[in-house]
Amino acid sequence: MSTTFIATNAISTTLRISSMKSRAALAEATKEATTGRLADPGKSLGALAGRDVVLRAELVDIEKLVDTNALVGGHMDVAQQRVSVLIETAESFQKDLLAARNSANGGGIIAQPAGANLQSLIATLNVTMDGQYLFGGINTGVAPIADYAAGSPGKTAIDAAFLATFGVAQNSPLVSGITAADMQNFLDTTLQTEFADPAWGANWSTASDQVMRSRISTTQTVNTSVSANEPAFRKLAMAYTMLSDLGTPNLNQAAFQAVIDTALLGIGNAINDLAGVGARLGTAQQQTTDATSRLQVQSDLITQQITAMETVDPAEASVRVTNLETQLDMSLALTARIQKLSILNYL
């Protein structure tokens, strides 16, 4: 007759296996009592587990979009602020130009602030955030505008153009002999080409015409940056350059007024263009804000669905923890007593 089924070893093994299962169940019950959620949704939900996985994947995608929108929104806020500063500076400078137009030493008065405005414009267009150049278009890793200083491509080209046209350098006293008509012709033709393609791309800008386009929702993408190649920035650069680096302190009054009038027209057009740039940014900012609001509503709804599927009753989980602890204690106690049994005690 077989006695395996009543052997103490067999009983001990059965109790150990039971203890292991109880420990695993106790760990799950403890986790559920602590978190209020299913410890293993896949096992507990059965056929609904697939729906739970899909909802969690959608929630992750939405959270990524919300985070991206916050980053993109920050970039647009900085760009919008810089555009506003450029407009304010240009409007203030217009008043200075009108005051200097009929001044006997207008060229000497206006050259220095014009140069400062040009450097400020370059610094603005080269602003960075999170390691990206905000006005570089899709070329976010390279400063979009080259500095304007001795030896720079932009200044070298303008110096050469001025010398070729008038036969003297900008700092020569002989510029006083340049007529208003000749200066106007230079401004309308030769100088214009230095701020148009391909000279602009060769000497001034490494920005791309294509701007950053960001996905702000599951179904919507918008342009979320500005390129330094915008006409507004070129017009400002040209106006500030002609006022600061075409020998204005030594020009005769008629030629100087031709420069002033051309600069005033260019700055006025630039201000209008900058307002358009700001409007486009503002539209993109509003679209991003609205998209984020919709995403947050979606996130809340999905979270509610996930919670409804995965939530457990903490009180019921606590009761299970207590029962499992009791069962485990009893199992361990029985195992200990059985292990002490020996036939030698009865011989």
Image: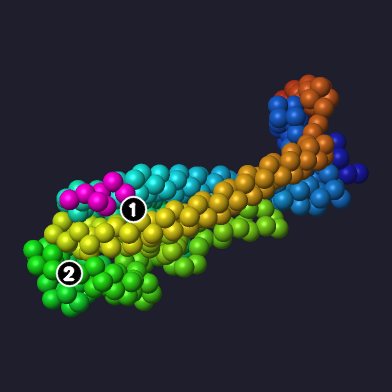
- Looking at the image, residue 268 lies above or below residue 95: below
Disc number placed over residue 212 in the picture, else none: none
- Looking at the image, residue 259 lies above or below residue 5: below
Relative horizontal placement of residue 147, taking residue 195 as reference (left or right)? left
| Secondary structure type for disc 1 | helix
Q: Is residue 102 magenta?
A: yes
Residue 193 point in image, percent of width and height: 33, 74
Relative horizontal placement of residue 261, taking residue 21 as reference (left or right)? left
Q: Which residue is mark 2?
A: 178
Q: Quadrant of residue 78?
A: top left
Identify the residue at image location x=52%, y=55%: 276
The answer to whether one can see residue 330 in this image is no
Q: Which residue is mark 1?
A: 121
Identify the residue at image location x=72%, y=50%: 58
Identity, as a three-letter code, of the amino acid under mark 2:
Ile
Q: Which residues are magenta?
A: 98-104
Quadrant into which the N terminus falls: top right
Identify the residue at image location x=74%, y=41%: 297
Circles 2 and 1: CB atoms closer than 8 Å: no
